[in-house]
Image: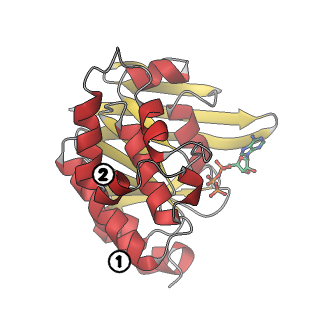
Amino acid sequence: MTVLRVDSLHVHYGTIHAVQGISFSLEEREIVSIVGSNGAGKSTVMWTLAGVAERSGGTVDLFGKPLPSKPHEVVARGLALVPERRRLFSALTVEENLVMGAYRRKKDEGIAEDLERCFRLFPILKQRLKQRSGTLSGGEQQMLAISRALMGSPRILLLDEPSLGLAPIVVDTLMETILQIRDAGMTVLLVEQNATQALEISDRGYILEAGRFIKSGSGPELAGDPEIIRAYLGG
Ligand code: ATP
């Protein structure tokens, strides 16, 4: 089943044409990566899908219906974004950040189960519950940012550069977790600048350059493509 369909998406910031007519779709339970260098337009695509940035052309369908125009409506329809650099409330505790992620729920409905699900994925967060999130390590903050998004019970999770600033060993764990999230039934769209590992765990990938897709293929195929390695993967 196609859960998200993007057709000829364009986004402008004034005279800057940041996204120039890209098309792609996500099938249920896929992991798809968009890879590209700094300024290629990756975050802009994510913000547009989350209802934060406005598109200047094209259509986006979420579960077969037009994408809502307001961010909270997009979340209510089952799509959650984990933004680049995590954007946590650093003065709040881990627990408070998690509860914020469940804000759209009716009173306590399902929140306890979702908390338990987060602790199964990230046991360390349970030990850190009363700690201010600003005092966590980078890896723990990323776990918290993902957990906060999961507290809204999304069916599609958008991850914008989750590995940014994390040590290689922490990135390995993160990639494992993304696979577990998919195995739990979610669809994942992953954006990465540092892309080998992202492509390796992805069913499909797209290479974004100056607002356009210049190549697509299966994740492992792109991860092993000499031209891609030379241009994007630091090979
Ligand atoms: P990065 O990895 O640095 O986040 P990116 O691939 O995510 O890069 P975007 O952040 O989407 O790229 O930026 C795409 C283009 O749009 C760039 O030329 C950028 O300078 C421009 N841009 C992004 N945000 C704005 C904004 N708020 N106002 C004006 N131009 C912007």
**Disc nearer the start of the sequence (2/1):** 2
Disc 2 within 8 angstroms of ligand 1 (CB)? no
Look at 55% across and 19% down and name the residue there: 70
| Residue with the mark numbered 2 | 31
Amino acid on which disc 2 is placed: Ile
Q: CA distance from mark 2 to mark 1?
A: 17 Å
Task: Please say whether residue 67 is visible from this viewpoint.
Answer: no
| Rendered residue at 57%/37% (across/down) | 47
Q: Position of residue 79 (x, y in %)?
A: 39, 31
Name the one closer to the observer, 151 or 133. 133
Residue 214 visible here: yes
**10 Å neighbourhood of mark 1: few (<14), some, or many (≥20)?**
some
Q: In the picture, which quadrant includes the N terminus?
A: top left
Residue 106: % across, % down: 35, 14
Q: Which residue reaches farthest front?
A: 130
Residue sitting at the far right? 15
What residue is pinned by disc 1?
A: 224
Tell me where residue 128 sits by quadrant. bottom left
Asked if residue 91 is positioned above or below residue 173 in the image, the reply reads above
- Secondary element under disc 1, as helix, strand or loop, is loop
Q: Neighbour class for label 2 at 10 Å: few (<14), some, many (≥20)?
A: many
Q: Contact, CB < 8 Å: mark 2 with mark 1?
A: no
- Report the side of 41 relative to 28 (left or right): right
x then y, percent, for residue 115: 29, 39
Instruction: Point out residue 5 in the picture as x, y percentages from the top left corner.
Output: 38, 32
Residue at the (65%, 62%) spot, across then down: 38
Q: Which mark is residue 98?
A: none
Secondary structure of residue under mark 2 = strand
Instruction: Name above or below for residue 140 compared with residue 102.
Output: below
